[in-house]
Amino acid sequence: MNVAPKSDFKSTISTADGKKITSNATHGALPDTLRLQEGGAVPISSELNDRHPLESRLKNWDVNEHERALEQYRQIFGIAEPLRREMELSIVEKTDFNPLNSNSMHRDILLNKDTSVDWEDVYPGGRMASGMMIGNDIHNQIERKTGI
């Protein structure tokens, strides 16, 4: 279960690492005190690359939730149930032809998302815009798929 952070999770950042950050200034010019950080605090953004620690968890939330559900199915029903669910999901993903770029109802049912309304269901984003481009309509996608 992924409730607690991983063992390599950074809860504190040391400013006494002694990192030497080079400046873009030419040799012999004035030192760049903001980049050298001598005698001052090192910005956290330089250590975390402008990312919050929870961002990686939220990014993989659906995958972790699905894996946790499969593990629970395995503990309750045995190995056959998660295998069947994974096999059905792979069959739906391989055979589902979706020229309108809409969500697959079959996939939503297998992932237990058929009763929920997600952000992507209301605001499909780039998928709708890509369908309006020249040469990317439903007829061209069907012709490309069938090899006509």
Image: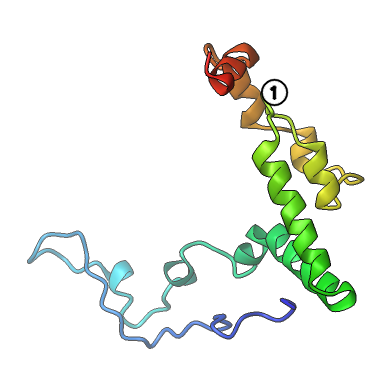
Spot occupied by residue 68 in the image (x, y as percentages of width and height): 77, 70
Amino acid carrying label 1: it is Leu
Spot occupied by residue 144 in the image (x, y as percentages of width and height): 54, 19
Pick out the residue farthest to the bottom.
16
Pick out the residue farthest to the front.
80
Q: Quadrant of residue 6?
A: bottom right
Spot occupied by residue 107 in the image (x, y as percentages of width and height): 78, 44
Residue at 33% across / 68% down in the picture?
A: 34
Asked if residue 108 lies left or right of residue 21, the reply is right
Could you classify mark 1 by the number of other residues whose Cα lies within 10 Å: few (under 14), some (14-19), or many (20 or more)?
A: some
Which corner quadrant holds the N terminus?
bottom right
Pick out the residue farthest to the left.
28
Tell me if residue 123 comes above or below residue 144 in the rendering: below
Numbered disc 1: secondary structure: loop
Spot occupied by residue 37 in the image (x, y as percentages of width and height): 33, 76
Residue at 42% across / 78% down in the picture?
A: 41
The residue closer to the viewer here, 42 or 115, is 115
Tell me if residue 37 comes above or below residue 125 in the rendering: below
Asked whether residue 69 is in view, the answer is no
Tell me if residue 112 comes above or below residue 45 in the rendering: above
- Identify the coloring: rainbow
Tell me if residue 134 comes above or below residue 74 in the rendering: above
Asked whether residue 45 is in view, the answer is yes
The residue labelled by disc 1 is 100
The residue closer to the viewer here, 95 or 109, is 95
Residue at 83% across / 73% down in the picture?
A: 72
Residue at 89% across / 73% down in the picture?
A: 77
The residue closer to the viewer here, 27 or 92, is 92
Asked if residue 93 lies left or right of residue 144, the reply is right
Q: Quadrant of residue 146?
A: top right
Asked if residue 51 lies left or right of residue 93, the reply is left
